[in-house]
Image (cartoon, rainbow, N blue to C red):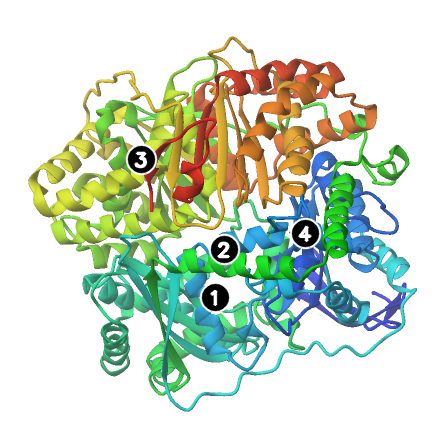
Amino acid sequence: MVADTLHGFRLEREAEVAEISSTVRLYRHEKTGARLMSVIAPDENKVFGISFRTPPKDSTGVAHILEHSVLCGSDKYPVKEPFVELLKGSLQTFLNAFTYPDKTCYPVASTNVRDFYNLVDVYLDAVFHPRLTPEVLQQEGWHHELDDPKGPMTYKGVVFNEMKGVYSSPDSLISEYSQQVLFPDTTYGLDSGGDPEVIPQLTFEAFMDFHRRYYHPSNAWIYFYGDDDPEERLRILDRELSGYERIETDSAVALQRRKSAPERVEKKYAAGEDESRSMVTINWLLCPTDNAELNLSLNILEHILIGMPSSPLRKALIDSGLGEDLAGVGLEGDLRQMYFSVGLKGLKQAGPEQVETIVLNTLRELADGGIGADMIEAAVNSVEFDLRELNTGRFPRGLALMVRSLSTWLYEADPLALIAFERPLLAIKERLADREPVFESLLRSRFLDNPHRVTVLLSPDAKLGLEREEREKRRLDNTLLAMDETERQAVVRANEELHARQEAQDSPEALATIPRLAIEDLPRENTRIPCDKETLAGIPTLLHDLPTNSIAYVDVGLNLAALPQAYLPCVPLFGRALLEMGTNRRDFVALTRRIASRTGGIDPAPFAGSMEGSPLAVPWLFLRGKAMVDKTQDLMDLLAEVLLEVRLNDQQRFRKMVLEEKARAEQRVVPSGHMVVATRLKAGLTPSGWVAEQFSGAENLFFLRRLAEAVDNDWPRVLATLEETRSLLVRRDNMILNATMDAASWSKARKAVGGFASAMPQGHAEVAPLEPKPLLPTEGLTIPAQVNYVGRGASLTEAGYDITGGDIVVARWLRTAYLWDRVRVQGGAYGAFCLLDRLNGTMVMASYRDPNLERTLRVFSEAADFLRDLRLDKDELTKAVVGAIGDFDAYQLPDAKGFTSLSRHLQGITEDRLQEVREEILASTAGSFKRFADAAAILRDAGRTVVLGREDALAALKEPALTLTKVL
C-alpha cells in the first residue's frame, strides 16, 4: 500500500496499466502544485522528463531560444554548457530538449541508475536555476555581429541560423503555414520556433520574463519511467521543489473558435530560377485530443485514408497525376485540438481547387458508398499492432509514452487516456461488429460537414530569397546608420566579450561540479547478442533468441553483389515495387491491404555495409517483416508471393512511385543537408560509400530524375531492368534469412520459414567486384537556401592510418568539444559532426545549417594542430571514454538487436573483435589524442571537400574552388 502523501507529494491516483505492463502513480506536489506521473515499468531504459506549458505571444522564437539557453549553465553547475559536458561523458540513451507550439520538454534517458540520476539532477537545476545572461541570448538566439565600427553588420545566433534552415524547406513551411491558418486566434497561429525576420525583435527583458512566467514548478508536468526506485524519484523532486511556493500561471491554451466557412490562403517559398512546382494542403480543425475513443477512431481513419499505398485518398491524389507525392502532416494529435492536413506536392499546372475537388469527392464517395471491410480490417490491425508492439526504434519507449500522455495531460485531461488503449479499441471493434458506420460517420461530421477548413497553396518565388536577403541587409544597414560612434564601439566590444567568453575554458573547479561516472563504473565486457546459425533449404539462417512479446521478426536478405552496378540506384525503388506493384494473384490494392491485415508490415531496407579488414562493400536489400508468431505462415506466404509472383509491368503505377521517390528525395535535401554532404564525401572514398550514394545520396536524386523521363520514353528498357534485377537476386544461393524471437516462438515459426526457403528457386549468382566511378575532389551542390552544409572527408586507411578503439574516443570528443565550440558556439551553425567509420576507414567532418564557408573549412583544417597542442586532463579523458562506451553500448529493442547481429555477420565482425575494440576504448590515453592529430592532418592535406548551399555563396569560395552542380 502506497502512502497518500510521501516526500511532499500527494498520491491522486494509482492504476495498473496492462497495455504497458506498468503501475502508474499520479501525484501532485502539495507545496507547489507540480504534477508528477510516475511509471513503474520493467524497462532498464529509464526516462525522466520535465515539461512546461510555454505558449508564445509572438514569433520571436522565445520558447525555442530559451530551450537552448537553460542548458548553458546553472547555479549548481556553473559551466558554459552542462548539456555538452553530459554529451561528452554520460551513458545516456537520450539527451535533448524539444520546443512544441505550446510546450517545452526536457527529457533524458539512461540504462545506468547512477548515470540516470546524474542526468536528472543537471536537468532540474538547468530549468529552474539557469544562468541566463545577455551573452547567452546573443549566442543561442541572435545578436548583431560587428567587427569594425564602419560595418558591415550581420545577424548571428544558433537558433537564428537553425530557423533560416527551416524556412529554406518548402515542406517545413507548408506544415507551419497549414497549422497557423487553422489556428489564427491562438498560440498555434504563431511560430514557436521563431521566424528569422522576427527573431531579432526579441529583447533580453522579454526573454527573462518568459522564463519567470513559465519555468516554475506550478507550471510543470514531471515524468518518470522505468525500473528505478519509485520512492527515490519523490525524494529527488521534493529536494528541488520544496524551496518554491505555489503561484498562478497564465499558460492555458485556448480553444480555437470555429470558422463558419472554408477559406483559401496563398503563401510563397524561395525557389530556384527554374522552379515551377507548388504544394497544396487541405486542412481541417477536428476536435480536442481528450476523448480516447474518438482520438483512436481518427487515428484509424487516417490509416484508412492515407496510411497505405492503396489507401483511397492517397491513391486518388497520386492517381490524379496532378502532383508527385502527398503533402501535409496527416493527423496531428500533439496539440490541444487535433487537425488533419493532406494535399499534393510537385504541382506544375494544377490549382488548389482541383486538389480540393479530388479530396472532397473521395471523402464523399467513402462516406456515401461505404468503406470496404478489407480496408477497415487492415487499418484496425495496423494501428492495433503498432500500439501493442510499441516499437519506438532508437527513441526510448518511456519517452514516446511521455509525449503521448502530454497530448491530454497538458490540457488538464487524463494522462492515461491514450496509453490505456484496450477499452477504446474494444469499443470501436464492438461498434464495427454491430455494423455501425463508424468511419463513414466521422467523415461526415468531422470533414464533409465541417466548415473549419482552410486550403493552403504554397507557390515558388524565384525572387523571394533575394528579397529576404535585401530586407535583412536594409534592416542591418539602417540599424548601423542610426548608431553613433559610441554605440557602434559598444557593439564591437560586446562581440569581443562574447567571443572571449565562448573561447574561454571552464575552470577545473566548475567542471568538477558535473556528476560523472568513473572508468571503473563501466562494464568491461560487451553484452553479446545471441545468434544461432542453421541452414533452411540451402539458405543460411540466423536465429536470435530474444524476448519479443510473441512477435516474429523475419528479415529476408538479397545479396546485391549479384547485380550489375549500374542497377544499384534503382534498388530502393525495386524494393518498393516488390510490395506495391501487385502480384499474379492480387493487384497492389489487395496486396497492400492483405499485408496490413495479416502482419505488422513488410518494409524494404537497402544496406550498404563494409567488410571488416577489407575495402569490399557489403550491399544487400532486405525485406523486413513482422507478425504475431501465430501469423508467421501468413507473413512468409506474403514474402514468397512478392518475391516470386510480383508483377512489374504496370507502367503507370511504377511512374507514380518514381515521382513519389523523386519528390521525397528532393524534400530531404534541406532538412538533411549534412547527410547529403557526408554521403557524397564517402562516395568518393570507399566502395561502400559509393553504394550508399547510389541508394540515397545526390546521385540517387539525379538518377530518379532521369528515370522519370525513361519510364515515359523507354519503358521496355526500364521493365527489362526490373525483371532482370528480380531474376538475379531471388535465388537461394543469393539469400539469407534472419529471425528474431524467443526459442519457443521459433519452434512454432520454423516450419513456415523453412517452407518459404524451400519455395525459393535454385540458381547461381555471379558476383563481380564493384568499380566505383571517381568523383571530383571538390564539389559544390547548389540549392536555394539561406544556410550552408560544409563537409570535408578523407580515407585514413588509404593514407596508411590504422584506426583503433582509441580513435573512436577522440573522434567523438572532437564533435562534442572542438567542433561544438568552434563551429556551433563561435560560428553560429546549428550543428557539427565528426563521423569516423572504423570499418571503411573514413573520417568526415560536416556542419549543419551553417552561415559560414571558409571559416568552417578552416576549423576542420586546424583540428590537427589543435590536437597536437592539446593538454587533456584526466577528467576530460574519463568523460570521453565514458561517452564512447555509451555509444558503443547503444540501447536497442529486440528487433534492432537481431538486425545488428545480422549486419555484423555479413560484415565479418566477430564478438571477439568487438571486445578488442571495447578494450582499446577503455585503454585510451592522452596519447590517443596526440596520435589522432595524424588522422586530422590527412583530412586537412588529402581530404575531399563538398559544400551544399546557395550558388552565389559557393561560387565566391576561392579556396578550394568548387565545381558546382545544381541539386535543387
Q: Earlier in the sequence, mark 3 or mark 1?
A: 1
Where residue 913 sits in the image (x, y, percent)?
57, 16
Residue situated furthest top in the rendering:
800
Q: Which mark is residue 166?
A: 2
Q: Residues within 10 Å of mark 3 (few under 14, many from 20)?
A: some
Task: Compute the Cα span from label 3 to label 2.
Answer: 24 Å
CA–CA distance in space, label 2 to label 1:
10 Å
Nearest the viewer among 469 and 46 is: 469
Q: How many marks?
A: 4
Q: Is residue 858 left or right of residue 725?
A: right
What number is the disc on residue 140? 4
Q: Nearer the viewer, mark 3 or mark 4?
A: 4
Vertical side of 734 occupied by 489: above or below: below
Quick check: 877 above or below 740? Answer: above
* Image position of 769 (left or right of 824): left
Seen from the viewer's position, the closer of residues 94 and 21 is 94
Q: Secondary structure at mark 3?
A: helix
Q: Is residue 225 visible?
A: no
Say which of 596 and 216 sits in front: 216
Q: Residue at x 68, y 44 (%)?
A: 44
**What amino acid does circle 1 point to?**
Glu
User: Is there CB contact under 8 Å for labels 2 and 1?
Assistant: yes
Label 4 vs 2, first from the N-terminus = 4
Q: Amino acid at mark 2?
A: Val
Q: CA distance from mark 4 to mark 2?
A: 16 Å
Q: Which label was assigned to residue 699?
A: 3
Q: Residue 227: x and y, percent?
A: 73, 49
In three-dimensional space, the C-alpha distance between marks 3 and 1, rounded to whole angstroms, equals: 30 Å
Mark with earlier residue (2, 1): 2
Where residue 267 sits, quadrant-wise, is: bottom left
